[in-house]
Image (tube, rainbow, N blue to C red):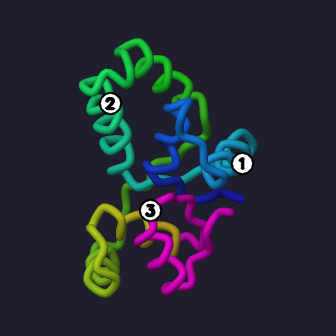
Amino acid sequence: MPFVLDASVTLCWAFCDEDHPVAGRALARIRTEEAVVPSLWWFEVRNILIVNERRKRLTESDTAAFLRDLSRLCIRQDRDPDEAEVLRLARRRRLSVYDAAYLELARREGLALATLDADLVKSARAERVPLLG
């Protein structure tokens, strides 16, 4: 069954020193199941990679290899958020609009959410959105 993948889980895969059980379960699932992401995920992932290049945690070739590997996974970008619902969730749960976009997507599609963000986990539970792991 598909699941919503957020950038925090995705980027865990890029760094060998960042290991988390939720990220491991998401990686295992994405090998056989589709992940769904809001369109902002594309920018978030690349921004975090560039920031870590600047911090000398990654090289350009590390980034290129990670993005190549990521492109081989079954990740579908959702480009149709329910704007009113994203804003409602951001206001109601005191989330960034970015985090609310992941929550809205999971809720709208009835999918589990894979995240390492504590506020997003708390909000997902409050909204009765299932969490991966």
Q: Residues within 10 Å of mark 3 (few under 14, many from 20)?
A: some
Amino acid type, residue under disc 2 in the picture: Asn
Q: Position of residue 62 (x, y in %)?
A: 44, 18
At x 49%, y 86%, the residue is 126
Identify which residue, 31 or 66, lies in the foreground: 66
Q: Position of residue 93 (x, y in %)?
A: 34, 82
Q: Which residue is mark 2?
A: 52
The alpha-carbon separation of the residues under discs 3 and 2 comes to 19 Å
Tag 1's secondary structure? Answer: helix
Side (left or right) of 5 relative to 51: right
Amino acid type, residue under disc 1 in the picture: Arg
Disc with the residue nearer the chain's start (3 vs 2): 2
Magenta stretch: includes residue 110:
yes
At x 69%, y 63%, the residue is 133
Disc with the residue nearer the chain's start (3 vs 1): 1
Q: Position of residue 127 (x, y in %)?
A: 49, 85
Q: Which residue is mark 3?
A: 117
- How many numbered discs, if any? 3
The alpha-carbon separation of the residues under discs 3 and 1 comes to 19 Å
Report the magenta residues as a range. Answer: 109-133
Side (left or right) of 81 relative to 113: left
Tag 2's secondary structure? Answer: helix
Residue at far front of view = 17
At x 65%, y 50%, the residue is 26
Q: Which residue is mark 1?
A: 29
Side (left or right) of 96 relative to 17: left
Q: Residues within 10 Å of mark 1 (few under 14, many from 20)?
A: some
Question: Which quarter of the figure is the N terminus placed in?
Answer: bottom right
Amino acid type, residue under disc 3 in the picture: Asp
Q: Is residue 47 visible?
A: yes
